[in-house]
Image: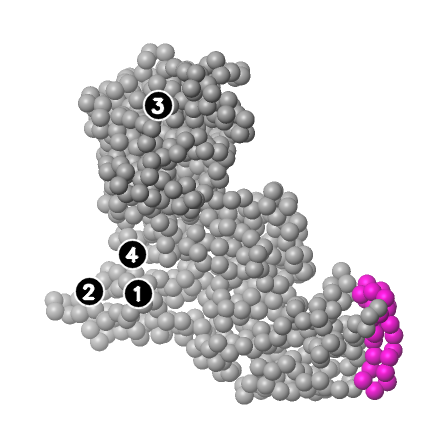
Amino acid sequence: MLRQLQSRDDAVTDGVVREQQWVRIIFPGVTDAQVQFETPKGGLLSRAVTEVLDETPLRMVEQLTYPGWDQHEYLFSSRPRRNIGFGKDALSTDDTADCFETLRDAGVEHTIAMLAAELDARLTDRIGCDVVEVDLTPVGTIPTRTCRLVGTTTNEIAFDQSGTESAFATHIHSLTKQQTPHLARTRVAKTTADTYLVEQQLARFERAQQVLYGDDVAALLEPVDGDLGSVYEPDALTSNYRRLGEMDWQARTLGEGLCRSHGAMVAHNDIGPGTDVETTMRAVTVDEYARLCGRDHDFERLRAVYEQLGVTPTVQLARESLTSVLGLVPNYGGGRWLSGDPVARARPQLTLVTTVSDASGTDREALGRGLSTKFGTSISAEIEAVDVWPRPSSDLLQAAIRGLREYGDTVTIDGAPSEAAFVRTTPDGLSEPVLVGTADTLVAGDLIVAAERGGGNQGVTVVTATEADAQQIFDIYRTPFQTAGDTHLALYPCSTQFWTFGNEVALRSAGETVDWWLTPDGTLTATLDGTELTTGPMTDPPADPGTPLLRVMKEPPHYSVFHPERGLLATAPSVDRLAADLSQHPIPLPVVPSQLSYLNCVTVFVVNNGRLTRVTPDAPVATGDKTWLTAALEWFLNTFTYQAPGAQLSADTVTPQFRQYIAPQTTGRFPSTADVDWSIKTLTDYEDGDKLPQRPEGRLPVLFDRDWRYPHVPGQETLPQCLKSDSTANQLALRLAQAIYT
């Protein structure tokens, strides 16, 4: 029975976003509250959509809506009824035909130009329209609960005879008031029977989905449920999740590392003959979300699964019922999505193509926050603009740029430090350098320098090729020095700072080794094959050791190599010739760490099938020494956790539940103390009159410098941060090193 719609719902089955261009509605009063709409509008949009479908060659209209920066965004796209071109004669009026021609001249795609002209003519003059390009990648690829409107019958469904109020708009309005970011997609197509086929999806992005909270905390963060199955009145309309609930399905966690709100479903009874549980749940979770984002065109698989569930994913509605499933929701002002949490999602990126009409009381310049500009002319141009050495592969750079944009970031080379390929800025405004490469090309000292540039609190992102490379990078951040002896640390060198004296660059022979040691009193020592060259404070440039080292400097028009006592030894006309003839190498400076570990500020991604996958560090091999993580756990237990007044929880009891709170390499940032208190309330049992431990103000204290026996004064610069990498001598050393090792 449910297959009888197949011949009629072809108009809504194509889920792939082929056109980047969409029509954007601009509400009145975005910058002038005196002319704002005060309530959601019901019949205005449904009337415009039905007229477009009735009077133009457009066979289907689809709508994307989500909370934007300054208004609730409404984006519209369409498909023609036939795969042939149509001209302005197909437009409903002369005015719309003229608008169509103007938009075509501005580079707007044929179908979108027709839709924009027709919609603009049918909406009130107070509402404006733009044509924009839409990039949905910032909403992320991680599946989330995606609710679909489904029907228990293929027959026509009629309801909401008043035709003035929109149940869907009211529901969207309530989600925004709860500050719940969401993305909804609705497709409407007309049938030959003067009814309309509707497909509707809604994904909510809850705060609990952004970090790996335990189930106890995630449950407290979940808002009151209100999916599409409870929005509409008729019994013939329900939702995929409501249908599964009616058939005794219960939530379970999907895969290791995903929180409850990421969960799929598992059945306690068979839903039908030949039904595969995993296939079913993938279809109504992962596949639904992919379809919502316009990445999935395999609608037949979804249709077959829903047929097994006894429902149809495309409902047939009477004309008067369209008002309820459409509707405009101004919802002025949106702000950031999920501010303060590790960013996994952000609103889609919009790029203005052209303006169709302006809205009353709306300043275009002020509305510009909702639009973005393109970075470069193409991905290849962006890759070419990256200036870092050693240079990562183009494939790795491309995956890094595209992948970070899927996390909602903007990417730019402006302001990137010398060791970083570029800088990422999250939708919350947090910026950090991005290092790209493999374990063979990334220099250990450069990884530490990137974290040290922010005084030890700088966030750093690293994109690498394999899980093994990622774990080597974590090892460097976990222990930011080569070896630790009883009397000194052996430090890592960097690749961007070199030992110089004025305009002279210090050189070592190719077979010699220069090591840098740091002692607990803050003394930095350089040795050449075990013989001390110089020693001094770690905050000062190393002193000139005198005779053991050769020097090179530029004396126009030549480059001169000389010894402090023996004088001039050789000259070369260029750096390349100098590198070819010279058996001497510039000496890189060491990186003096200010922390015992930098794991609390690094995020590492691995490229997996062209996409970025965030990885966490493997646990270090157990030793008898107290690790940074062990010390942090003890502090946490002593401060926040009590089984009863005066009784402390044991570490083996609390570690599995609370590791996420004191291991920032898992969560990305420390959660607020309010989250911790929720966990205490859930995991502990207090008698009447007992009080929870007093919560300190602000966030959890930083734990990175516990038991660090080497000198660290907050804000004090150490090598190589205290030196200038753009000095003439250092630039010569850098060019020479690159020429030698290339």
Q: Quadrant of the N terminus?
A: top left
Label 1 near label 2: C-beta < 8 Å? no
Q: Circle 4 — which element?
A: helix
| Front-lying residue, 94 or 475 | 94
Residue at x-position 73% and y-position 82%: 528
Residue beneath label 1, please? Answer: 673
Residue beneath label 2, please? Answer: 685
Q: Does 65 sit above or below residue 721? A: above
Location of residue 265 by image quarter = top left
* Residue 227 on image: x %, y %: 27, 37
* Residue 434 on image: x %, y %: 55, 58
- The amino acid marked with disc number 2 is Asp
Task: Determine the CA span between mark 3 and mark 2.
Answer: 61 Å
Location of residue 479 by image quarter = bottom right
Q: Circle 2 — which element?
A: loop
Q: Quadrant of the C terminus?
A: bottom right
Left or right, 587 with respect to 194, comes to: right
* Residue 432 on image: x %, y %: 51, 60
Residue 564 lies in the magenta stretch: yes
Left or right, 325 with respect to 408, comes to: left
Return the disc, 2 or 1, that comes first in the chain's sequence: 1
Which mark, by number, is residue 217? 4
Q: Does 345 sit above or below residue 202? A: below
Q: Does 61 sit above or below residue 55? A: below
- The amino acid marked with disc number 1 is Thr
Q: Nearer the viewer, mark 3 or mark 2?
A: 3
Residue beneath label 3, please? Answer: 122
